[in-house]
Amino acid sequence: MRAILSVLLMTLFLPAFAGEWEVVYEFPQWLTLLDISCVSPDEVWAIGLNEQTNSNQIYYSSDGGESWTLQYSGMDLSIFLLGIDMLNPSQGFISGSYMIFMPDAEGCGAMTTNGGAVWDPVEPPFLSLVANYLTVTAVSEQEAHMVGSWSFDNLTGLYSTYDGGSSWETHTAPASHALRYLSVQGNEFWATGGTWPEEEGLSGQEPSLSRFHEYVPGQPRSEGGRPGQYEASIWYSPDGGSNWTEQFSSTGIGYMNGIVMVDSDFGLAVGAGDFTSQIYRSTNGGDTWTRIHFPSEDEHILVELRMVSETEGWAVGYNPNGPEGQPGSSILGTSDGGLTWALEAINEPCGLLGLDMYDEHRGFACGGNNLKISRVIRYDDGYYGGDTASPAELPVCRLSSHPNPFNPKTTLLFELENAGHVRLELLDLSGRSLRLLTDASLSAGEHRVEWDGRDDAGHAVSSGVYFARLQHEGGREFRKLLLMK
């Protein structure tokens, strides 16, 4: 009775969202999508493996995922492309798995500076036999980081560039732990990881393709016949990856997956156990991580996590017992900073492995199933003209921003239906004006204004939540901005 009452009480406080997640595209058979990245409500990239042609593939959509163009198909970039992070419409990075004994291997990832028209290989670290870089995090036009492991000598789990990809350097990973996901706040790094049990000399190593599995992509390998207990972990580096301290360790979890530090104090991480979701929350920079429970957590595996503000965010993964005998899509949302989570009603036969949110109005998830059929699932609340709101319900003047969260600058976009006077300024949480960006008469149409994260005095503001207020003749619009240093 007490357990039932607990579930009912949690249900009363489950977050409510204005939008819906729905399938916008289904790819032909034999393609398994592994990751997805968006730079606007409409521009999206997805990567995967076509097992019929045995080739990596990169796809691009310019209409919010409703149609896709094949940008690249081949084996010359890397054996497997595993993670993608597009920084802007031109520049982006891909992480991958490199095996020196494969004749077609040229890199452990790829990068583009022209929107994907050309993808150039990123060379693997010197003398690495097998480099498994599961994810990539693009911080700025100059800085990006791949995280993973070397399967033989396990000397590095972090491969970084600070000059836009012209050169890369390695950092030593935490001892005997493979890194999986990374979150960056300036020079402070947080990384999730995990390790094999002691068995046949494999301690500290993870599968070459940790997003793949014979049952479903991304499933913890303890279901695949390897005995013993895993040790999941979260690591912290105060100096850009040169030195690491273990903040969290739990034996029995498959491994920790996605992690997002909203600022240097507050963050969330998700883990994957034996068919058990793990959600952890910290408000002190990771010194302590508190487990957050939610109904039906034993039925789902969580893989990826994104926060669009201090309070709102999403996590995706899969339910091993989904429809049609396939893994089902699992999507959870929070609107109170991760204290409670709501499970979306959508349950497609598609295990979700990739997630990216443009903002609180639009986001994308992708994945596949055992039949090698992949789907793209889109979140839409009608703000950008989706089906959940009619044009009459949309504001006369729409204010948006990209990127958001941002560091150190973001572009504010708004469209005026009619010419008129406009005042655009930045406010702190108390409503105090920090920066006046525009105070002028403007023509009808689209306008863009950049904010460099500084106040009117030219001082850089600290990490946190700010508001852009747009006053025009038709009324006022507000936009929440999250600066993450």
Image (tube, grey):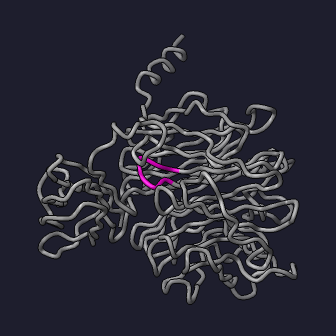
Which residue is at 65% across, 71% downward?
A: 95
Q: Does the magenta stretch include residue 132?
A: no
Residue 352 percent coordinates (x, y): 66, 47
Q: Residue at x 22, y 72 (%)?
A: 460
* Quadrant where the image shows the C terminus: bottom left
Asked if residue 359 is among those painted magenta in the image, a careful observer would answer yes
| Viewer can see residue 270 | yes
Asked if residue 424 lies left or right of residue 380, the reply is left
Quadrant for the N terminus in the image: top right
Vertical order, 440 against 389 (above or below): below
Query: Which residue is pictured at 21% across the width and 71% down the height?
Result: 454
- Front residue of 452/294: it is 452
Q: Is residue 435 visible?
A: no
Relative image position of residue 312 (x, y in whole percent)? 40, 44
- Choose between 65 and 94: the one closer to the eye: 65
Count how many numbered circles sit on residues in the image: 0
Q: Position of residue 367 (x, y in %)?
A: 69, 50
Predominant SS along the magenta part = strand
Residue 241, how many percent across, how many down? Answer: 51, 74
The correct choice, above or below, for 46 with respect to 99 in the image is above
In the depicted structure, whether residue 316 falls above or below residue 287: above
Horizontally, residue 19 falls left or right of residue 78, namely: left
Give the left or right position of residue 435, taking residue 313 as reference: left
Q: Give the residues in magenta.
A: 357-363
